[in-house]
Image (spheres, rainbow, N blue to C red):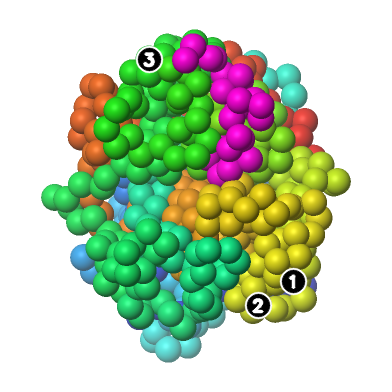
Amino acid sequence: MASRSIGLMPAFLAFAFITISAFAQQPPDYFHFWNDGKWISEVTIYNQDTIPEQDYFLVKKLEGMTAFREEWKIFIGDGEYVDATVTRAYDKASKKWSLYYVDDVSAQHWDSKLLDDKVYFFKTFTFKGMTFYSRQSWSVLPNGKVLRTIDRSEDQKSWQPRYRQMFKRVEEKSVGQEKSGRVIDRSKYRDQLYGFWLGQCIANWTGLVTEMDKIGNIGDIQTGPFYTRDDWGKPDQPSIWGEGQPSDLSPTIDFVFRDEGEVWGADDDTDIEYMYQHLLFTNQTSFLAATQIRDGWMKHIKAEEENYLWVSNQAAFDLMKSGALPPATSEPGSNPHYDMIDAQLTTEIFGLYAPGHPEVALKMAYLPIRTTARKEAASISEFYVIMYSLATIADPSISMKMQMMSMAENARKHLPNESYPAAMYDFVKSKYDAGLPWEATRDAIYQRYQVEQADGYDITSRKLYCNGCFAAGINFAASLVSLFYGEGNFRETIKIGVLAGWDSDNPSATWGGMLGFMLGKYGLEETFERTFSDKFNIHRTRQNFPNSIDDFDNMAEQGLAIVDRVVREELGGSLDLKENLWLMPDSELTSQLE
């Protein structure tokens, strides 16, 4: 088979490839790097000989499963190839991976074992009366390429290298795409949209336990020392409106879940986004008009009884009832709360509707943001929209920490350098880079922006209720603490967000939604090693929707339909229904990030 002998393995294959952290059982996300698309062997070494012919693998992750379906074209020598169908799948009962290989003459099942943090597939073969054993493994290299190894043994003790292959994923031009483009799997995206709603609910309801427990010690309302990491799992302390009583959601500061058979409740972190998605879907548009926003608010928000609106949202709603239309509803002369937190927790979802195209997402979110926000508060809201749009094309071959840092640095470019949000970003990032504990950075934020009123952030001088604990600025700074120090880890990001202080459910819900999208439904279930309720009670806080109790599957389907329209009408892309893919050109902004 060999075309030439190289004697020794090339230096690049001597890399110390990335291994997965030790697990008691095989991790279900072990093959997180095995992305949909076409993979080609750049180099194949067989018994120390280099094979010039390339193997081709077409990979597709199966919807709703921890499994991959693959079509292989394998070189077998003398100019011949064999076609094979392969499925690799994870069994949740046994906590093990299996690989099933079928070609025109053979059907093989490869069982697996976890050895030294690597999943190996094993198979016993008999040839001419002799028994031998094979094992193969797959590992991701630091450059994102994948190393496949096949070893052989006669006694299962001493293993000899048989194959070494390095694969790279290739992007092919699709029909109708003149420039280099992007291919996105709709089935995977649907799972990610489900993960957005689930992740946001987990983070929202966990954050509600500590909402407004800790806001500092300026003015009439003083709450004592801020929480630290040591307070996780400890008794919750009363909020500023708790009348001396801790949260009724949880006696301790811990994650709040809803089990299968229970129902997640809507809250102001999820219900306005739900309404905007409903309006986009029912109006069959990518851009909501001012009258559509006004009519949606008037129909779905209660006018008299408890309506779960505060500060700028409530002021905008009152202005709508008086006949005003967005963006007049956030005009500083009419809405004194234009710089509060409202828009940044109601519009992030627009980033998910324009995958990899933040410039389009910002256009879609422009009027919804300015329904309640102006000036710096609008810029902060746009920062989150950009983060969400960039999350849709994050590179899974690099660590979540690196993904977060890259996304954040690129979203930072949108903040005007002379503004206090830009100064806050740079300040928090400098403390993180200096290695300070997150608590020290949070305390430094309080000192700099609420005590000293630096960088033009003058909320304290305005003597607002709770010293502006609802303000966009201070909560933006707090959100950066959990973003940077959480380093892309869902659990740690939410823990820090919940403990950081101020309006703690809002930043936590924002990052919970974004990281939930990146992980998807099954990634979240694997993160917590459990399943969750998929039911959502929108009528807890809003009214007049077709389904008072909706579910995340339906909500994800609606989001998918909106993306379908945006891809075709706004991104210049197309929908491949046969392969269930979106094909779209790259954004000039995101192509610069590659």
Tag 2: amino acid = Ala
Measured in 3D between alpha carbons, the distance from the residue under mark 2 to the one under mark 3, in whole angstroms, is 47 Å
Q: Does the magenta portion include 271?
A: no
Would residue 365 be found to the left or right of residue 522 on screen? right
- The residue under the point 53% across, 57% down is 466
Give the extent of the magenta segment: 322-343
Identify residue for label 2. 440
Looking at the rendered image, the quarter that the C terminus falls into is top right
Q: Does the magenta portion include 339?
A: yes
Tag 3: amino acid = Thr
- The residue under the point 51% across, 76% down is 224
Tag 1: amino acid = Lys
* Label 1–label 2 contact, CB within 8 A: yes
**Residue 120 x/y as whole percent:** 43, 72
**Residue 554 x/y as whole percent:** 29, 31
Identify residue for label 1. 431
User: Is residue 41 in view from this perspective?
Assistant: no
- The residue under the point 41% across, 22% down is 297
Q: Earlier in the sequence, mark 1 or mark 2?
A: 1
* Label 3–label 1 contact, CB within 8 A: no
**Is residue 6 or residue 54 the one in the foreground?**
54
Would residue 403 be found to the left or right of residue 313 on screen? right
Q: Decide whether the magenta segment is chiefly helix, strand or loop.
A: loop
**The residue tagged with tag 2: helix, strand or loop?**
helix
Identify residue for label 3. 282
Measured in 3D between alpha carbons, the distance from the residue under mark 3 to the one under mark 1, in whole angstroms, is 46 Å
Q: Residues within 10 Å of mark 3 (few under 14, many from 20)?
A: few
